[in-house]
């Protein structure tokens, strides 16, 4: 249960109700973060426009890399909603359940390429407090993905840090988009 109640459709404007309906059509229900954002008009519209822009962005990175780093950040922060939703999106984009479930232990997994592992290690370094990104990491990623790919990778990691921290802080929980085994929180080490 979120720490801030989700605003039901009858308490929001007609335009927001239309967006709630779009969410229900696309995902089967209204996304909880969206219902929490609705408490603050500026946060709602900034978040909605940002997410729409993210969905339409022309990608340089392979979608699997984006999905892996986004899922990795969700796992590191421990955001149940982000893990659940991100796992669903990853599965729809073509990642196998085995690869999604291997993200918590990616470094030792044979399921990921060296480039995918380097991208997830970068997500780890960016998400650490304080961040631990090194010049060597950036140079290696630039050689693999180019400047545009490096910028896109950094953007996706930063955005998922914002999403996961927001949702986790407000207690937004998993909505059941994926099977419990695929989206289960990893044990704390």
Image (cartoon, grey):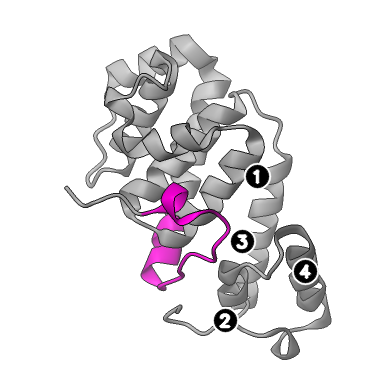
**Start and end of the magenta stretch?**
163-184
Q: Secondary structure at mark 1?
A: helix
| Mark 4 / mark 3, whichever is N-terminal | 4
Question: Are the residues flagged by discs 1 and 2 in contact, CB closer than 8 Å?
Answer: no
Specify the farthest residue to the left.
Answer: 189
Q: Which residue carries the number 4 mark? A: 19
Q: Which residue carries the number 1 mark? A: 54
CA–CA distance between discs 4 and 1? 17 Å
Question: Badge 2: few (under 14), some or many (20 or more) residues near its Cα, within 10 Å?
Answer: some
| Mark 2 / mark 4, whichever is N-terminal | 2
Q: Secondary structure at mark 3?
A: helix
Residue 87 or 71: which is nearer the viewer?
87
Residue 119's spot in the image, x, y percent? 41, 26
Q: Which residue carries the number 3 mark? A: 47
The answer to whether residue 123 is above or below residue 182 is: above
Which label was assigned to residue 6? 2
In the figure, is residue 162 to the left or right of 86? left
Residue 13's spot in the image, x, y percent? 77, 83
Question: Badge 4: few (under 14), some or many (20 or more) residues near its Cα, within 10 Å?
Answer: some
Q: Secondary structure at mark 4?
A: helix
Q: Residue at x 54, y 66 (%)?
A: 175
Question: Which quadrant would the N terminus be assigned to in this image?
Answer: bottom left
Residue 156's spot in the image, x, y percent? 51, 39
Which is closer to the viewer, label 4 or label 1?
Answer: 4
CA–CA distance between discs 2 and 4? 14 Å
């Amino acid at each position: 249960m979120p720490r801030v109640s989700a605003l039901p459709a009858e308490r929001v404007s007609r335009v927001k109700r239309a967006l709630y309906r779009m969410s229900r059509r696309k995902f089967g229900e209204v996304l909880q973060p969206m219902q929490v954002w609705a408490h603050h008009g500026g946060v709602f519209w900034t978040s909605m426009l940002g997410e729409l822009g993210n969905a339409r962005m022309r990608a340089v990175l392979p979608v699997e890399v984006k999905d892996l780093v986004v899922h990795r950040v969700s796992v590191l922060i421990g955001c149940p909603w982000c893990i659940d939703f991100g796992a669903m999106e990853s599965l729809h984009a073509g990642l196998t359940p085995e690869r999604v479930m291997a993200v918590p232990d990616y470094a030792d997994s044979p399921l990921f390429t060296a480039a995918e592992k380097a991208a997830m290690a970068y997500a780890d370094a960016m998400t650490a407090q304080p961040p631990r990104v090194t010049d060597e990491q950036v140079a290696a990623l630039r050689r693999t993905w180019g400047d545009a790919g490096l910028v896109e990778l950094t953007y996706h990691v930063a955005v998922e840090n914002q999403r996961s921290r927001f949702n986790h802080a407000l207690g937004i929980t998993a909505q059941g988009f994926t099977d419990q085994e695929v989206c289960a929180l990893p044990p704390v080490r």
